[in-house]
Amino acid sequence: MGKFLWSIRCFAIFVVAYSSLDCLSACFQAEQPDIQPPPNAEQLEFFEKKIRPLLVQHCFECHSINASRLKAGLTLDSRQAMIKGGDSGPALVPANALESLIVQAIRYDGFEMPPKGKLPAEDIDALTKWVEMGAPWPNESVSVDSPTQQVFDLQKRKSSHWAWQPVQNSQIPVVVDELWPKNAIDRFILSGLEHAGLKPTAPADKYALVRRLYFDLIGLPATPVQVLNYVNNTDEHATAKLVDQLLESPHFGERWGRHWLDLVRFAESRGHEFDNDAPYAYQYRDYIIRALNADVPYDQLVREHIAGDLLTSPRVHPTERFNESILGTGFWHLGEWVHSPVDIRKDESDRFDNMIDVMSKTFLGVTVSCARCHDHKFDAISTEDYYALAGFLQSSDYREVAFDSMEHNRTIGQQLAKLNGKFQSQVSALISKVAPTPFEGIERLSPAQADAIPDPAKANCLIVDYAAIGPNDFRSDGELFGKQARHVGQMFLSVSGGKSNLEFSRSNVAASDHFWDVIKKQESDSPNQMSGIGKLPRSGRTLNTPTFELRNGNVQCRLQGTGHIVACVDSHRLIAGPLHGETVRGIPKADGFQWVTMNLSRYVGHRLHLEFTPEVGALLEVQCVVQGAGSEQLKTIEDSSATLSNQVAEYAKEIEAAVQSDAMARESFSKLLDDWTRERNGLQQQVQTTSRLAMAMMDGTGEEEHLLIRGNSSNPGRSVPRRFLSAIDGPDAISIQVGSGRLQLAERINSPNNPLTSRVIVNRIWHHLMGRGIVPTTDDFGVLGQRPTHPELLDHLANQFVADSRSIKKMIRTIVLSKTYQMGSQASSAAIEMDPKNQFWHHHPQKRHEGETIRDTLLSISGRMDPTMYGPSIQVHLTNFMDGRGRPAKSGPLDGSNRRSIYLEVRRNFLSPMFVAFDTPTPFSSMGRRNVSNVPAQALILMNDPLVTELAKAWATRACQEVPLDDQLIPNARVNWMMLTAFNREASDLELASSRVFLEKHATQNGLTIRDDALWEDFAHALVNKKEFIFQR
Amino acid sequence: MNHCNRFRPTPINRRELLQRLGSGFGLTALAALMHDPAYGSEPGQASKADPKAGMPNHGLHHGAKAKSVIFLYMDGGPSQVDTFDPKPMLDKYHGKEPGEFFKVEATQFNNNGKVLASPWKFQQYGQCGLPVSQLFPNVATCADDLCVVRSMVSEFPEHTFANYFLHTGSGLQGRPSMGAWITYGLGSENQNLPGFVVVNGGLIPPGGLDCFGSGFLPASYQGSVFKPNGTAVANVQPLEISADRQRSKLAFANELDQLASDQFGTHDGIESAIRNYELASQMQTAIPELMAISGETQATQKMYGMDAAYEQTRIFATECLMARRLVERGVRFIELTCPSVSGDRWDQHSNLKEGHENNARAVDQPIAALLKDLKQRGLLDQTLVVWAGEFGRTPFAQGANGRDHNPFGFTIWLAGGGVKAGTAYGQTDEWGYKAIENRTEMHDLHATILHLLGVDHTRSTFRFGGRDMRLTDVKGHVVHKILA
């Protein structure tokens, strides 16, 4: 929340106070009629002479009922209109210039009006004086209503646009040519063609089909053996078997994972000025590859992306047993991050904008972000819809989660709590037998009574008191702090340096436990990391307070131990100076409890929460957090804590004395402690001490976002309850008991009542296979997007997808086994004449390969490809032309260690020039459909790039080895093998002849012979520059 | 199905193209083809009234004043009060607390010091009497050609946001740079060189190469980064030991393409790809020609500062000479980035005097020479030169002797192609802090640049993500008062 709202609140208090003293109250509240004291002649003359001309000249262009384009919903045509105000509230408070927005605006205080330049001082003085006079205005009849504006009618828009309508059960059409169709898809397509008087073209030949299937399904060419096996296979199910085999290939996930990464603007650095690392982003990349290979049902994939951190039974990796589901939530956090924003709240709202943009385009194919500043210009999406979704993000947090160990250690944590409970009751039972007054003191100190912070200290300054924290507000990442606070008097086993002692908690605290010290320190693997937070050992080791609004710049934390406090203001976390350094504070060494004060005065009025992290191997106990407490208040808290602490110490002494005085009890007690320690140590052995990390969501305090007027973060309006798009789910808020409610959001996205989700994903699959979506604008099903060419087919596929348990692989299989997919790519000239854009699918369009595919093909045919999957990316290779701030100190290898392109690092500010030239998108928003441009740089790369020439050379060497020349030195066999390798087809006689001519001529010209590898290197490089190398039929 | 009238015309294929070339229709078609995205772009907002809106190469909307733009990008944000916007109040109140006189806005470093007088004297130049500080003695001699805008504002006090904003009209990464928009709209007049060239003198601005990206536009429009030395551009140097050897390979590849044409037919993408090889080969010769600066006369080289004692002056001199040569070759949009001087880009958070002097020393003489050279060759009229940083600097100190970022009021200047020469437009307050008269926003600057090139900024659109995107977003007004 911005400072502005706070000042409005102060103002509201001020107004009430002021109006009770004075009798001007009528003017202050918009809903009450304005009673203007009759202006005198002198005042009216002043108005007509000075004010009205000023308004006409400088304001009415944008703020009049006659304005051609009204701005900010504000008209200034009458006194009433001014008092009524616009988007930002009343513009005029008669007789109070200070509080009148119109005066603030012309003084350039907050608003800057007129925008083209500040008015001369005398005009500003005049208008100020006029407001102070009480804003005298002659009695004239002017409409207060806004000029006729186009009314945003969500229902009307919804009912008039196809995408919002329920998915229909399409009738499978009857066709004339019953022999052609193989499955339902074919009937839809053929029916369209027949109606248009068109015919499907002939089927693709087997060579074309096998190449198409390999590239479309796994993104790699078939080997000569694979081609020939398929082509020579007479089994009528050969194609189906090949498809099944390709769908089971681990390369499938790599191919389709890259498509998916385009949707989630995947990158491994944050861009902006210094291109900081986005640590562990590759874990998300690996997640999506695994998920696609495992054919995780799409609704589960959606659920994991939106709320994988909140699933009660997350999907675990089949062999490594780590939490897969939580990794999906990483997609939220793959965007650009900014360091040192001057307006930190605006930065947050920009970040949310991008997250909403990507989420809504990816899963729903609608552009919700267009409704950030105003209701959507074209679609049934309101500004409230946007902010209703923003609330889910406002209620969520970022973390780097220890996903390997979290599930296992959560179980250990539960067992530890159980074990502690067991021994606590056994020790209690023992003590109550021997203690003088059985445990009276401890019981008296139950949290409900003595332990809360005393009232005088609470007044207005308490943020969190771990004595009285609710179970939903006790939030931590990892197990260090347990799942609840330790209340005063509670016994616990203190183990340090191999010795264990029974202790009684001296205060109410959230306390870390040495039990977890066995967890090894995580070494950061981000060399390009400036974030001060990024280097702290925080993953799985934080205690988070609830979110609160900062009212006072001094935030005081009472705690003991060492570590760090991070104040997460407006979810800003890239702390790399010059600003915002004060949000990270080390805890100085001290004996016992101390107050650690954070000076956060820059952020008064903002919302934040604190995160506490103990030093590795150290303990941290947090008692309470207050803001702006005076020394008296602090002292009250200290005194009351001291009293409690002393009481506990007394009881502890009493108990010890009682136990010591009884030999039997002493022995039992000692045995109990030993058992407790032993069992505890045994359990500790089972702690998973290392874990990989990944970026993920974490639930925060449930909050509603405020609607930001015109998208301006310093101009918040009413708060909007969290809910899904009202066009789909109605205007009612989702009832959320605790946390962000993202899981409920996920269910709504997956709901059968939502017509978008299934249509959008089947359309994406169709797009990648058929070269164009049924809805060509894959990320925009809205009014400005294109209409489906075959709406019935789209709905048929959407229904079938749901019926097939939302299996992406099954949908791919269905499409590629259709006659439609298997059509040839040569259209008859008659068909081109009638349907030049192939709207009816009379042929299968040719496709140019992506930059990644071109590189992967080169690796594959040269035999250089390292098929290793997963893991940290290979650093990007830096050329001399890749320069700028944040340039990594070291360049990655030219050949990317021969790994597939999906494993090459994507740095926002250092994108691979080769990929960029071939239209790999800049990772800033969802890009379900890449551009396919033609630019000379592409030719230059294939002609002159060192990597291309190196791999062409390696391919030639391989060819020379694989196909030795016979005594006759006839090159045909080798030429044919190379064509089979690169183009997945046999060389034609003409090509063989032409190749021979070239080889002979080129050899002569360059002093080479047919036996020289160098000649074949040139031949290989020429084939790479044949267009067929980068196109598929 | 109803025909929606939004289909784009089918790009012509290569054979047709050759026929048309024969009939003298070639040049524009060639340019169009060069930038043909083949498929992938969404049909935009074309209508009967404006059939080419939302389409690449939509061409002129009205008569153009300028054909090319040279953007002298002053990375880091030169100080307005130390260059072209003198403020005597700073001398008068030097060392005083700025908060006593005006409200000090939040700054990037939050280390605000006292009112800081300019270390440089101003003098009036030319018939117009434009005041210019001692930092630009050479540019000052061109005062009568300059149109100084003293009332620029930006929305961002951080470099990266402000750089993206200046270059792309949005503070965030991923939008097309203005050079990309301009080549998208107008194409290039030279088929052998890219339409949008960035000559990198050494400093890539914060925000990185994406300041010159094509964003959601096809890759054809992205800025090509040239270096002012060596081969200038990546992959333009054949690796073969002889040009003949490469030619022989490519001829063979081409022959195979022709042989396979029965399988691939007349696919637009392949046709364009074939054409690209011709362009690429031509680029391999065009770029060495471009870089043959040694062929310039001694007098010209000297005028630019190729013999200057300061290495950074020599670098920027080469950049400016390249810019002129690129303009002569019909390149649409040329951006020059600054050489790296000791003490950072124009971003003097401390040591203002030394840092600004070094930066000015690097660019002053070459810029003045560029203006004069363009003028004497009759090119200045059709070339718009824009000198701008992403923001200005505070009139009060950062620390003792620096200045922090100031987006509230700063100075840029334009020259040539259709701007009113010898004028100053707009003004900042008496401190040089905030623009108070004729506030000119980044979108206004963009609208004006497009206008001078003959493009209506509201009609040059590209449909992406459910919107008809523009360089000027939903804003921007042409600043008519600075037009000649």
Image: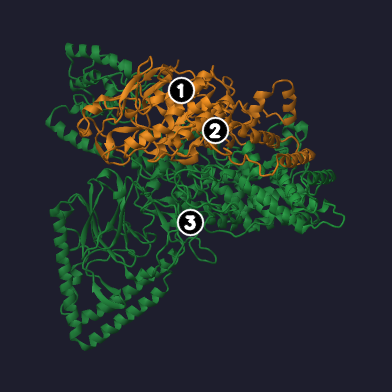
Circle nearer the viewer, 2 or 1:
2
Nearest the eye: B185 or A960: A960
Count numbered badges in the picture. 3
Give the chain coloured orange: B
For the residues tagged 3 and 2, is the chain the same? no
Q: Regarding mark 1 in the picture, which secondary structure is present there? A: helix
Q: Amino acid at mark 1?
A: Thr
Dot 1 alpha-carbon crowd within 10 angstroms: few under 14, some 14 to 19, many 20 or more: many
Label 3 to label 1: alpha-carbon separation: 48 Å
For the residues tagged 3 and 1, is the chain the same? no
Dot 2 alpha-carbon crowd within 10 angstroms: few under 14, some 14 to 19, many 20 or more: many
x and y percentages locating residue A57 in the rendered image: 32, 15
Point out the image quarter for the N terminus of chain A. Answer: top left
Return the chain for callout 3. Answer: A
Q: Disc 3 marks which residue?
A: A327
- Above or below: residue A468 compared with residue A415: above
Q: Disc 2 marks which residue?
A: B197
Dot 3 alpha-carbon crowd within 10 angstroms: few under 14, some 14 to 19, many 20 or more: many
Q: Amino acid at mark 2?
A: Val
Residue A80 sits in quarter: top left
Label 2 to label 1: alpha-carbon separation: 21 Å
Nearest the eye: A971 or B37: A971
Question: Could you tell me if residue B106 is visible in this image?
Answer: yes
From the viewer's perspective, is A614 left or right of A249? left
Residue A279 sits in quarter: bottom left
Circle nearer the viewer, 3 or 2:
2
